Image (spheres, rainbow, N blue to C red):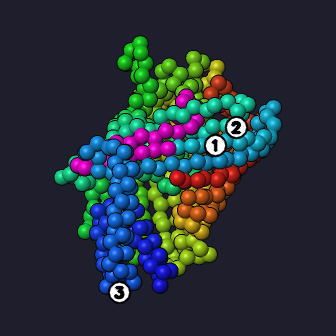
Amino acid sequence: MKVVRYTAATLVLAAALTGSHAAAQGTDSIIDLLVRKGIVTEREAKDLKTEADADLARAMNRANKTKVASWIDEMKWSGDLRLRGEFFDNEDQANTVDRWRYRYRLRLGVESKMKSWATVGLRLASGDANDPVSTNESFDDTFQKDPLQIDAAYVIIKPPAWDWVSLTAGKMLQAPYYHPSFNSPLVYDNDATPEGVVGQFVFNLDDEKRHSLFANVGGYLLNEIGASSDTDGYLLDAQVGGELRFGGEPKTPTVRVRAAGGLFLTDNVNIGAQQADSPNLGNAVDNTGNIVDDFEVVHVGGEIAWQISNKPFLGTPAIVTVSAEYVKNLANGFDSLNQASTNLVNLSSATEGYSGQISFGSARKKGEWQLAYQYKYLEADAVYDGLTDSDWGTGGTDRKGHVLRGSYNFQEWWQLGITAFFTEKVSNRGGPNTIAAANPDDTLLRVQIDNVFKF
């Protein structure tokens, strides 16, 4: 009987340590039930309540030492650490040897949700403050200390009466536009954090929210030139699209179709060598180092995800996803590069890009895995090289090739991923903002082995 009583006491104390009013009421109910069943005596029950109340008071006192503003309803912390080993087989590069390097990425974020209709967010990240498309930090420099940067700082406003509207201002977590889930995106690197304002609008077409239309419209500052605001660099991106869900539950449909199209416009990126703000290469530049024109990029894309079975296949969801995207730069300056500048003589138009991917599975929960294959073709001036994928080839544009990726979740908080890029030059351009391939038909192999830990 003593063992039973000690066990009962342990359960009661564990309930009390949850530190809430509801838990205290539950503790009293448990003790009363134990008395009625004859498991503990009235005296023992009184002692248990006294000890439980004392533990509850101590827990509440500890919790109250962390103060937040009365208007904050919830604070959510998130973070991840990625450890990467990366190999380069530089067959197509002149005077460049094969190499291994080791890197890490650390991110820590917090979001505070107000009781009414706003969310304020902050994220810190490792990496070079002068690199807009990477938060990686290499293992080098004899154990020197590494900086931590402000990666995002933003506010999201959702008016209570207009649940279809969301306004975001500041430095955002990522480019707020739909694009197919590629391993190597065409327009924006996954680590790009735009600075400006964006409005996002979602219109549900049915009560179950299976079908919807959406629009994203934003304006961003690329560069502020102190001498004159007439030369500041700006970016405008507008997109409209839709989503359809068929079969199954609304949140887990049998088939999900998404598609969108939009226009990406820059202003004054051809002034002041603004491509120098990113290590990416590819766009045509003149003798002064400036990109030859602003960008007018039409982008369209979509994907179809099909759950071919309700039962997992070897531990992962049986989902096949097919994605595709196309971009075309309509700016006239990139079609007439036979100028007097020696860097631009006889350069043919290179203003298109496209990509396609097929994947199986979904690596989100413990034991799940995913395999994916992508083909990508991105000409030199198809998109603004300063914002596109830094992992694609040597980073930037003027590359074509294949991407293979496999990932597996050992735990929900631990994922192993292996990605291989097999790329070669589209053209053999040289110059200050691109690399001429010594062997244009040879392949540059880039392999990344990632361990990602979420916390």
Marks 1 and 2, how far apart in space?
8 Å
Q: Do the residues labelled 1 and 2 touch (CB within 8 Å)?
A: yes
Measured as percent of width and height from the top left, residue 398 is found at: 62, 39
Dividing the picture into quadrants, the one containing residue 40 is bottom left
Magenta stretch contains residue 129: yes
Mark 1 element type? strand
Q: Are marks 2 and 3 in contact (CB under 8 Å)?
A: no
Circle 3: is it few (<14), some (14-19), or many (20+) Cα within 10 Å?
few
Q: In this view, does 433 lie above or below 46?
A: above
Residue at the image position 38 percent from the left and 42 percent from the top: 121
Q: Is residue 337 visible?
A: no
Q: What residue type is labelled 1?
A: Tyr
Q: Is residue 115 visible?
A: yes
Give the residue at the far top of this rendering: 227
Circle 1: is it few (<14), some (14-19), or many (20+) Cα within 10 Å?
some
Dividing the picture into quadrants, the one containing residue 259 is bottom left
Marks 2 and 3, how far apart in space?
64 Å
Residue interval drawn in magenta: 108-133
- Residue 139 numbered tag: 2
Nearest the viewer among 166 and 379 is 166
| Figure disc tally | 3
- What residue is pinned by disc 1? 104
Mark 2 element type? loop
Residue at the image position 71 percent from the left and 45 percent from the top: 86
Looking at the image, tell me whether mark 2 or mark 3 is earlier in sequence order.
3
